[in-house]
Amino acid sequence: MWFRRSRRPARPRLLAVASAVILSSCTGSGPPPPDRVVEPVTGEEIAGPLGIRLAKVAGVALKGRPARGPLMEPAGQIREAISLMYTAGFVDPAQWRAGFPGVLDAFAPGSRKRAREDLNQLTLGGSARSLISVTPTDARIVVRFLPDRKRRPVAAVADMRFNAIGSGAGFEVPIRHEGDYLMRRLDGRWLIVGYEVRGRVGS
């Protein structure tokens, strides 16, 4: 059964005309690329970060065309933050056993209390107890930037789509999770200040 949880303010209307950066990682038929394959983990071994490949960058502005270069660095920072979050919430069994602490690192201080309350919706939740490993099959993110008057990115909405196969003792289950994350640059980092997520484990 799908769950849905909303914890974000309404998107700023200016995002409709803000710069857009599209980050995507998709797999077609066959196994996922080597950097996205997660081997079964035992003991306290830690899985590597989820790979999200930067595939395309595009920009839209109210007047003129925004330069592509200035958006590449913040796009990479957002990709890294979301990658570490999903690694902690879905890919790394060591994080599952510890209660998903790494997930909260992606949130702004003012949003962490709500995120802690919503960990079951932001992660595998209780389903992790019956799983041994998770192999990602599709991970993609679309980021829309809101620029200031000087066209510097000050906020963003990151739309994340994640699909994987969870393996347990003699069984496999499909995993799907979708999240829309409102992010701002705070103290030199892009952090989540609001979100809306939905997902499921199993068919």
Image (spheres, rainbow, N blue to C red):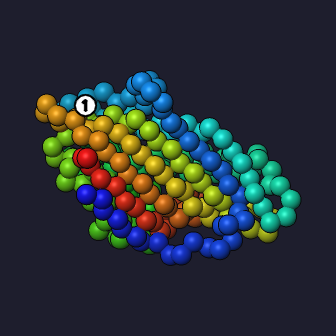
Q: Secondary structure at mark 1?
A: loop
Image position of 186 (left or right of 87): right
Compared with 115, 30 (above or below) is: above
Image spot of residue 45 (x, y percent): 27, 32
**Quick one: which residue is furthest to the right in this view?**
64
Image position of 60 (left or right of 203): right
In front of the other: 81 or 65: 65
Image spot of residue 81 (x, y percent): 49, 50
Image spot of residue 138 (x, y percent): 44, 38
Q: Determine crowd level at label 1: few under 14, some 14-19, many 20+ residues with C-alpha closer than 10 A.
A: some
Image spot of residue 56 (x, y percent): 66, 41
In front of the other: 98 or 4: 4
Q: Based on the displayed image, in which of its 4 quarters is residue 107 positioned?
A: bottom left
Q: Based on the displayed image, in which of its 4 quarters is residue 110 positioned?
A: bottom left
Number of numbered discs overlaid on the protein picture: 1
Which residue is drawn at the image coordinates 13% and 31% (left, top)? Answer: 170
Image position of 114 (left or right of 109): left
In front of the other: 57 or 72: 57
Which residue is drawn at the image coordinates 46% and 49% (left, top)? Answer: 161
Which residue is drawn at the image coordinates 59% and 44% (left, top)? Answer: 23
Q: Is residue 98 visible?
A: no
Mark 1, residue position: 41
Disc 1 marks which amino acid?
Answer: Val
Q: Is residue 161 visible?
A: yes
Which residue is drawn at the image coordinates 48% and 32% (left, top)? Answer: 27
Q: Based on the displayed image, in which of its 4 quarters is residue 41 positioned?
A: top left
- Quarter placement of the N terminus: bottom left
